[in-house]
Image (cartoon, rainbow, N blue to C red):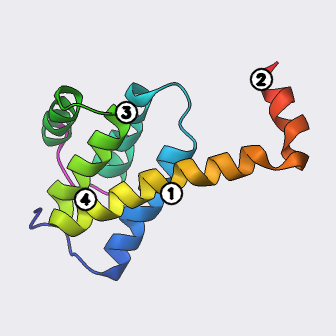
Amino acid sequence: MNNSVVIDKKFYWELFKSTFLISAFTVGGGFVIIPLLKAKYVDHYKWMSDKEALDLVSVAQSAPGVVAVNAAIIIGYRLAGDTGAAVTLLATWDSEGSVKKFVSLEENDSFLVRITI
């Protein structure tokens, strides 16, 4: 765990919210999420160093499974242990379900057609 980060309800909310938004609005595959995670967790919140984030992403890439999910879980674990990993996993998983619900709404069909043309 990261000793320089204050682990409280606000931290967990920020961790969930940032992971959810990055996961929900990232288009282009798992590798696209990596610079966004760095921008949020390293540059904005300063929860970890640039080298540390790069090391964690390297581990995420070498692990079997989806890179975006692996990266989120490993970063969550590094920041707040098992609870942090669970929070980032839930945020990544829930964002996928939320996007599917949005896409399935009939009134969004014309919007989605316009952005794919």
Camera-side mark, 1 or 2: 1
Q: Given the image, on which type of amino acid does mark 1 rest?
A: Asp
Q: Residues within 10 Å of mark 4 (few under 14, many from 20)?
A: many
Residue 31 in magenta stretch? no
Q: Residue at x 13, y 66 (%)?
A: 4
Q: How far across and down, in percent of the image, does residue 11 sit?
A: 32, 72
Q: Given the image, on which type of amino acid does mark 2 rest?
A: Thr
Q: Residue tagged by mark 2? A: 116
Q: Are marks 3 and 2 in contact (CB under 8 Å)?
A: no
Q: Secondary structure at mark 2?
A: helix
Q: Residue at x 18, y 65 (%)?
A: 82
- Total tally of numbered discs in the picture: 4
In the image: residue 88, left or right of residue 62: right
Give the CA distance from mark 3 to mark 4.
19 Å
Above or below 65: residue 106: below
Q: Residue tagged by mark 1? A: 94
Q: How far across and down, in percent of the image, does residue 46 sit?
A: 26, 54
Q: Earlier in the sequence, mark 3 or mark 4?
A: 3
Residue reaching furthest bottom? 9
Identify the image quadrant of residue 89.
bottom left
Q: Residue tagged by mark 4? A: 85
Q: Secondary structure at mark 3?
A: helix
Q: Image quadrant for the C terminus?
A: top right
Q: Residue at x 23, y 69 (%)?
A: 83
Q: Which residues are magenta?
A: 45-50
Q: Residue tagged by mark 3? A: 35
Q: Residues within 10 Å of mark 3 (few under 14, many from 20)?
A: some
Q: Given the image, on which type of amino acid does mark 3 rest?
A: Pro
What type of secondary structure mainly makes up the magenta span?
loop
Q: How far across and down, in percent of the image, does residue 60 sit?
A: 21, 35
Give the CA distance from mark 1 to mark 2.
24 Å
